[in-house]
Image (cartoon, rainbow, N blue to C red):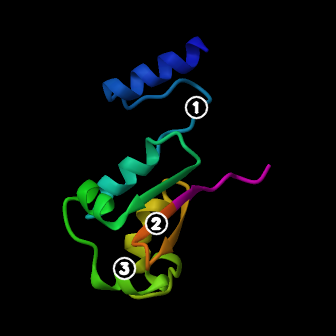
Amino acid sequence: MFEWIRRRRLIAAGVDRAPAGVPKARTMTGRYALLFEYLEHRYADSIVLTFAQIEDVMGFQLPDQARSQLEWWTDASAPDAERDADAWRLASRTAVPNLLAQIVTFDRVFAAT
């Protein structure tokens, strides 16, 4: 338990080195970096956000395709989707949108063991 507290303190202090055996944190740059940071630092396995909450986190509006096309959230082959989807994929999450309700559920992806 003390090791966990020590690691959390290092992360909070912004120290770039991790103790031996602890993988280095993933990073992301670009427009969706703030969404990545938000999702990366949530402990819940499932996070439900409205479109407005996502826009508040990012500081800009979602593109029109995000509001009208499921593929924007789920299909990496869609135009510009790869860059946009990196925000939740690098945070080890999947995005499940409900366009009518204007919400997205971000579920944690667990590595197969």
Picture layout, residue 14 above or below residue 81: above
Residue bearing mark 1 = 22
Q: Which residue is located at x 61 percent, y 15 percent?
A: 1
Picture layout, residue 14 above or below residue 104: above
Residue bearing mark 3 = 66
Question: x, y percentage for residue 103?
Answer: 43, 67
The number of discs equals 3
Give the distance between the C-alpha atoms of the residues marked 2 and 1, in whole angstroms.
Answer: 31 Å
Whichever of labels 2 and 1 marks the residue nearer the N terminus, that label is 1
Question: x, y percentage for residue 113?
Answer: 80, 49
> In the rendered structure, does residue 61 fall within the stretch colored magenta?
no
Residue type at numbered disc 3: Ala
Q: Which residue is located at x 51 percent, y 59 percent?
A: 106
Q: Nearer the viewer, residue 45 or 16?
A: 45
Q: Which of marks 2 and 1 is in front?
A: 2
Identity of the residue furthest to the right in this view? 113
Q: Quadrant of residue 84?
A: bottom left
Give the magenta part as a residue range.
106-113
Residue bearing mark 2 = 104
Question: x, y percentage for residue 36?
Answer: 39, 54
Q: How dense is the environment of label 3, judged by Cα within 10 Å: few (below 14), some, or many (20 and up)?
A: some
> In the rendered structure, does residue 112 fall within the stretch colored magenta?
yes
